[in-house]
Image (cartoon, rainbow, N blue to C red):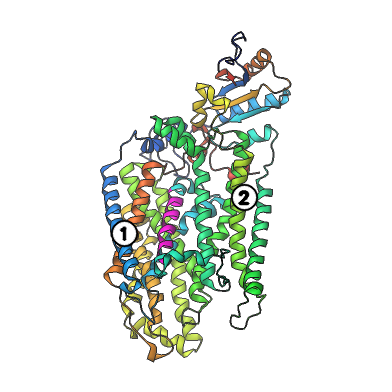
Amino acid sequence: MATVTETTSESPSHVGPYPPHPEGLLAGPHNLTSLGDKIANVVIGEQPPPNAWWAFFLLGMTLLGGLGVAVAYLFYAGVGIWGINVPVAWGFAIVNFVWWIGIGHAGTLISAILLLLHQKWRTSINRFAEAMTIFAVSCAGLFPLIHMGRPWLFYWLYPVPVNFAMWPQFRSPLTWDVFAVTTYFSVSLMFWYVGLVPDCAVLRDKAKNMWQKVIYGILALGWRGSALHWRRYEKLYLLLAGLGTPLVFSVHTVVSFDFAVSIVPLWHATIFPPFFVSGAIFSGFAMVIWLAVPLRQFYGMGDLITDKHMELCGKVMLGTGLMVSYGYFCELWMAFYSHSIYEWDTTLQRVWLGPYWWSYWALITTNTIIPQLLWIRKLRTNEWALFAIAGSVHIGMWFERYVIVVTLSRDHLPSSWGRYAPTEWDWLTLAGSLGLFITLFTLFIRFLPMISITEMREFLPHGQGGRDGHAVMENAK
Amino acid sequence: MTAPAHDPYAPSTPAVYGLMAEYETADALISATRQARQAGYSHMDGYSPYPIGEVADELGFPRSEIGAIMFVGGLCGATFGFLVQYYLNGIDYPLNIGGKPYFSWPMFAVITWELLVLTASVSGVLGLFALSGLPQFYHPVFNVPQFERASQDRFFLVIEATDPQFDLTQTRTFLATTSPLSIEEVPE
């Protein structure tokens, strides 16, 4: 290890015996032990949960209670309590479904695509982003399920060999969606758990009491860090990443097919799959920022999730935001250029003449105009500015799906035009799904390591005990 | 750890699983493994808090089986998925959708792909656990108190007693030449 002399002006926060990280991805004097302690102490109770944790947990539980009430009344009274009707028959259920599943895409993007692209900065954020994915997909899956009317018959969606003498219709994008989302959830869960096994072994060996030792010991499956096991583990990790990458694209592509395979004007568009996928990554990174800021603020994780990470997330948001904006432009242009009177008239209804014109401009403001602030480096490196812009993206991405869904209110035939307005039960269900997400995420950071201990150790520079970056790509054989 | 209960007169030395040497760095473990291999040892294993590909290379495990398992698993899943869709929608309960042929294979591509990913992933994960013999909650290496640090900041090499060249004193002498922090006997 070459001795690097003082370059304190680079990073004043840096103290200790080690030189600053060359890429700014580590902002503290960490070695194998200090890193493990820092992350594991949150879980084993050495560092008690901050007050903010309780605040978020109670908020989540309260909203989750709201979800319980909303769903109970829904099951009692039926989907008529929502604002849905013909022609807007899906309403909030699909808006929220697509919104949540979009958020769920960044986790796999970070853990799989950035791994294949040798992006070392994924290491600090992949664990909680994967958790975010799983919880967001759970929230997403809730909506089609409760929208079904008779949700206890959900298994009709699968080809279960029972005596119906009937089978699902496999040429329908809605059936594809069932398989895509189920696969995505299962593969994300496996990827997450495989990554957690060595970390549970760390917790087992650090446990402060019998309960922790037993529970983390069971979760660790007796992992002992054998070189032979690691070899298989790394190969599996790489291959799961290799499969996860096209999986992410396929899942949101299939979600977009729910719309694009129909013949509704402005839905029947080939731009939909790439447009949906970039939108998903856009909103997913916004959620990563929303989760990373509290972790830095309340758990002091700023030396692992550094300003550099935040800036990189901002850049990904800027890039995918531009792709999404290109999609908005492309929709307008194709409607004009196609000379289809239905496409063009529906566009005019959406943008100006229809009753929901304001939602289109809310979308353009929050998703296209405000994210342009990310061009400014000062704002990318200021976490509260990033937090605010990410909030704008959350609203924008929700409106994007809203705008698409209310298109149905005015399409080909004016005699079948209608209106759509959500009821208080729609809003309560949306808030309740946020509660489910917050509750699951707060429980996750309390009971499982929010950052991968194993991968962070490997990521440490050679002189600090690590292997200077994630070596999966080189070592997976 | 103690002598078998059924034989009170057996010698009190416990059966030995192997000898465990502890190292401070990953590079020390790599070079120790290399030296052990060159010295002719073959039944051994390295333990580390994070993956070190070079150790597995030196242990003579240059390539894992996971790729083949996932390939076969994925292929089975994709074939099954495709055939199920064709059989159910084309033969068992033929559905005429927009006048499309019953064997409208492009429409089956999506679910075929999703099942390929699902079965490949499931077989990979099960393959990892099955080949590694996990879950395995008891293993002799856990008997060494120092081994707790294998998941923290230390690196271990264990030469197992089943090795044809294993000899308690000679192997210990050999391990001492690889500059370890400590050498422990691993009771069975």
Q: Which residue is mark 2?
A: B123
Q: In the rendering, which numbered label is found on residue A68?
A: 1
Which quadrant is the C terminus of chain A positioned in? Answer: top right
Q: Is residue A253 visible?
A: no
Q: Disc 1 residue type?
A: Gly
State which chain disc 2 sits on. Answer: B
Residue at position x 49%, y 27% in the image? B149
Quarter residue A433 falls in: bottom left
User: At which x and y percent is residue A26?
Assistant: 43, 41
Viewer-proximal residue among A194 and A35: A194
Percent x, y of residue A182: 51, 60
Which of discs 2 and 1 lies nearer the camera? The answer is: 1
- Image quarter for residue A224? top right
Q: Is residue A110 magenta?
A: no
Q: Nearer the viewer, residue A199 or A433?
A: A433
Magenta highlight range: A128-143
Q: Are marks 2 and 1 on the same chain?
A: no
User: Dot 1 surroundings within 10 Å: few (below 14), some, or many (20 or more)?
Assistant: some
Give residue A294's position: percent from left, percent from top.
33, 49
